[in-house]
Amino acid sequence: MKDHDDKIEQRYRLLVEAITDYAIYMLDPEGRITSWNPGAERLKGYTEQEIVGRHFSTFYTEEDRAEDLPARALDAAAREGRFEREGWRLRKDGSRFWANVIIDPIRDADGRLIGFAKITRDISEKRAAQEAIFQAQKMEAVGQLTGGLAHDFNNLLTAILGSLHIARKRAIREDVRDLIDNAIQGAQRGATLTQRLLAFSRRQELQLVAIDVVDLVHGMTELMRRTIGPEVLINTNFAQDLPKVRTDSNQLESALLNLVVNARDAMPDGGEIMIAAELETVTSGRRSTLPPGDYVRLSVRDQGEGMDAETLAKAATPFFTTKGVGKGTGLGLPMVHGLMAQSGGDLVLKSVAGEGTTAELWLPVADKGEVEVTAAPVLEAPLDPAPTALTVLAVDDDSLVLMNTVLLLEDLGMETIQASSGEEALTALQTGVLPDVVITDHAMPNMTGARLCEEIHSRYPTLPIILATGYAELPDGVGIPGGVVRLSKPFSQAQLSRALAEACQGGRCF
């Protein structure tokens, strides 16, 4: 019988020692370690000689020890027959890992407690994956909310700015015009915030083309230096023969300027900002947020205060800011994050408190056949002024925006027809004299502006159309017929006039 028990014990020992993915060890009733398997040594860094005889609270964080969690865990295991929990644990080198812990009591034949069996498993990767999914879901939900708010806010700003411009033209007293100018500036700031909301929610319209990152940075270096002041130096370090990337040139400039300003604000006593770029190849499984392929990693590094782990985790959350009241909107980094997502790249923030921050823009390398733009594109020739005495069909489901559009058109000398839906617009076209131009909102119930454009184009192929929208929100499978002019909300009277001129190019309005 004794030989049989010895064989069972030997097999059990061999099994425990063969397991290297789990830390399996024994504790005496007070919590001191009495055995140690190779998996425990691999996971926690201690050899058997170093750890046997020490209390298992060695692996707990200072916060958990302060709350007497080790003793409470043993008490729960003894009382309930099992204890299981997840939490941070410490390795010998002081690093943390997220662990799943199971403690089972061991009793003799008489039921007396003689120790505990403890199993610890490192589930850091599982937790990171769960957090990544949760973060993605949270950002998607916030993006949906902010995108909707931004669209409605754009409509309000369209009405406000249009009315203010007309009021300024009709104001007689200079002091009244000054007040209107202040109101216009405030509304334009609101429009800028709206664009950042749209960028975060990935609903801004992008022109994705091939960009030379080195040329772009060099082209805006002087602007960055004027913006941040003389106390902070900007240096660059670019790898040789970097390929072009695929993104929106204007939005990338805005994102880069935003990161540089953040870096300056982190160094109130001055310092150096390093802008660097190098080619990176992402292989399968290396970065969960990026598909395999080639990327240019454009980074902005400062020597500032840095961020602790908690602040770093919130840095790209909309409306979160460490700046004082009135000094930050909390939308800068979310805007950059949204741009990277729309471009097929990623924003990666790295920071340690007291050691500075590095913001990395991972930009996908452009295909060789993609259209390239330079850092300083050639300006198009100015359009002729919009012709007057046109009849324009204005379509919008928002009565404020519709009234504002009509006001702007009539102030330009146009005759107007109004419709509050796509269906109403088609009825007006069928029962009356055709207008010279149609201007329609996109986000309308039942029939979107894009769908209305298709219907008009199929029935009246020569009728010019302007599509006014706050963002690129076209549903999958629905496009815009060729020749349709895009007008971004909020728009001024001058922008509306330019859109009309573009729609009427080639004499189509006569």
Image (spheres, grey):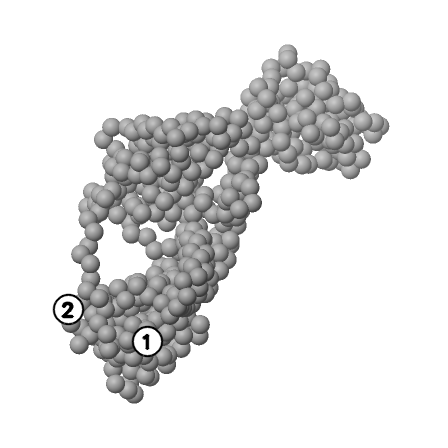
Q: What residue occupies the far top of the structure in this picture?
A: 49
Q: Position of residue 371 (x, y in %)?
A: 21, 48
In the rendered view, tell whether residue 312 sits above or below residue 140. above
Q: Dot 2 corresponds to which residue?
A: 506
Q: Count up the numbered dots.
A: 2
Task: Report whether residue 120 is seen.
Answer: yes
Q: Dot 1 corresponds to which residue?
A: 410
| Element class at badge 2 | helix
- Quarter-of-image position of residue 406: bottom left
The kind of residue tagged 2 is Gly
Marks 2, 1: nearer the viewer: 1
The kind of residue tagged 1 is Glu
Task: Say which residue appears at 50% left-offset and 26% top-offset.
Answer: 355
Along the polypeptide, which appears first: circle 2 or circle 1? 1
Q: Residues within 10 Å of mark 2 (few under 14, many from 20)?
A: few
Left or right of 324, for residue 421: left
Task: Say which residue appears at 83% left-offset and 29% top-offset.
Answer: 111
Q: Position of residue 237 (x, y in %)?
A: 31, 27
Left or right of 422, for residue 388: left
Along the line of sight, which residue is nearer the eye, 421 or 9? 421
